[in-house]
Image: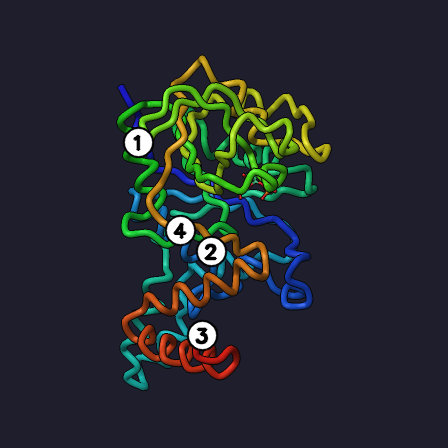
């Protein structure tokens, strides 16, 4: 029997040094893309895939993330009084039901694998999704829902994958691939951040996973990998052969919001997609590009 997927772990303990000074006193996951913080995109995506329970792996200075999903009584009262119903709806949309959020602390930055291991009591014996909020995916079908569907089809682990330029394999977890139907790829091996000359393929993992709980057994060994960190990729690699393991070439476009350029691209892409502001942004971009680069630009 394939267990239902109801849990998600969201690691949010990172320091966000790439976005200083914006992140000096603010969690990087609270940076907005248009008008919604990154973390809310991840939570909404997970909910669209049937996730009901969330575990935020936090660290110092991250309390705003938990606050964000709470009920803001005072704010609601003021908005109601002033008849600002659209704003009130936006607030309500960012609430999670009572008991849907737990947090655990990752006291030391020992790597993504260590962060996930911190959620072991929450995960228990259940399958779980992982969403890295830095990775934002613009798609017709939410990326985690695509993974969940593949999980229900295979019953094993599924990771979202995409082709990256060969020179960039050292930034990602890379797949060694077996059977490949163009969408679902059998995973034969996984390597974290290999040099291009050592990379078994150009197919990289993005920050979306559905994993079986057995991965915790391997994480608990605390073996250090690339960058001397406890790597999730290494623990996942140990599951290959024990449980079905696939990569899913998801439909959609991924933005690396942990990077300034990626973050800016996401702002533009998400704004263009919005019915309320897309046309205005498009007019601005067209006019501005013409002004800067001329008619051919
Ligand atoms: C992490 C994972 C890596 C994955 C990447 C996706 O790396 O370790 O396997 O490809 O996320 O964003 P990080 O970006 O934390 O260095």
Image location (x, y in percent) of residue 257:
53, 56
Residue drawn at the location 43% of the way across and 33% of the way down: 159
Ligand 1 within 8 A of label 1's CB?
Answer: no
Q: Quadrant of residue 242?
A: top left
Q: Earlier in the sequence, mark 3 or mark 4?
A: 4
Reading the image, the residue beneath label 2 is 39
Residue drawn at the location 36% of the way across and 25% of the way down: 180
Q: How far apart in space, not on screen, are marks 3 and 4 (Cα)?
A: 27 Å
123 above or below 14?
Answer: above
Q: Which numbered disc, 4 or 1, marks the residue closer to the eye? A: 4
**Helix or strand or loop: what does disc 4 sit on?**
strand
Reading the image, the residue beneath label 4 is 253
Labels 3 & 4 near each other (Cβ < 8 A): no
The quarter of the rendered structure image containing the N terminus is top left
Reading the image, the residue beneath label 1 is 150
Q: Earlier in the sequence, mark 4 or mark 1?
A: 1
Q: How far apart in space, not on screen, are marks 3 and 1 (Cα)?
A: 44 Å
Q: Which numbered disc, 3 or 1, marks the residue closer to the eye? A: 3
10 Å neighbourhood of mark 1: few (<14), some, or many (≥20)?
many
Q: Earlier in the sequence, mark 3 or mark 1?
A: 1
10 Å neighbourhood of mark 2: few (<14), some, or many (≥20)?
many
Q: How far apart in space, not on screen, are marks 4 and 2 (Cα)?
A: 18 Å
Q: How far apart in space, not on screen, are marks 4 and 1 (Cα)?
A: 18 Å
266 and 68: which one is in front? 266
Identify the disc placed on residue 296. Answer: 3
**Helix or strand or loop: what does disc 2 sit on?**
helix
């Amino acid at each position: 029997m394939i267990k239902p997927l109801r849990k998600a772990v969201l690691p949010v303990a990172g320091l966000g040094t790439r976005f200083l000074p914006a992140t000096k006193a603010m969690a990087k996951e609270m940076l907005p893309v248009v008008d919604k913080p990154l973390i809310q995109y991840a939570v909404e995506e997970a909910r669209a895939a049937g996730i009901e329970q969330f575990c935020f792996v936090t660290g110092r200075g991250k309390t705003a993330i938990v606050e964000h999903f709470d009920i803001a009584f005072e704010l609601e009262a003021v908005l109601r009084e002033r008849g600002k119903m659209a704003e009130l709806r936006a607030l309500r949309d960012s609430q999670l039901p009572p008991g849907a959020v737990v947090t655990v602390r990752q006291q030391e930055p020992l790597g993504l694998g260590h962060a996930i291991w911190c959620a072991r009591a929450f995960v228990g014996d259940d399958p779980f999704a992982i969403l890295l909020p830095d990775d934002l995916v613009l798609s017709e079908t939410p990326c985690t829902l695509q993974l969940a569907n593949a999980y229900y089809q295979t019953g094993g682990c599924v990771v979202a994958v995409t082709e990256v330029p060969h020179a960039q394999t050292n930034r990602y977890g890379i797949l060694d691939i077996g059977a490949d139907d163009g969408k679902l790829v059998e995973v034969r091996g996984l390597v974290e951040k290999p040099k291009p000359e050592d990379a078994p393929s150009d197919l990289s993992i993005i920050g979306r996973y559905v994993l079986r709980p057995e991965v915790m057994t391997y994480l608990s060994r605390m073996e250090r990998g690339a960058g001397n960190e406890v790597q999730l990729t290494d623990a996942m690699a140990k599951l290959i052969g024990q449980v079905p393991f696939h990569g899913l070439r998801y439909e959609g476009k991924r933005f690396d919001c942990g990077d300034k350029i990626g973050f800016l691209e996401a702002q533009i892409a998400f704004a263009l997609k919005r019915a309320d502001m897309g046309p205005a942004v498009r007019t601005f971009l067209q006019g501005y590009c013409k002004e800067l680069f001329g008619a051919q630009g």
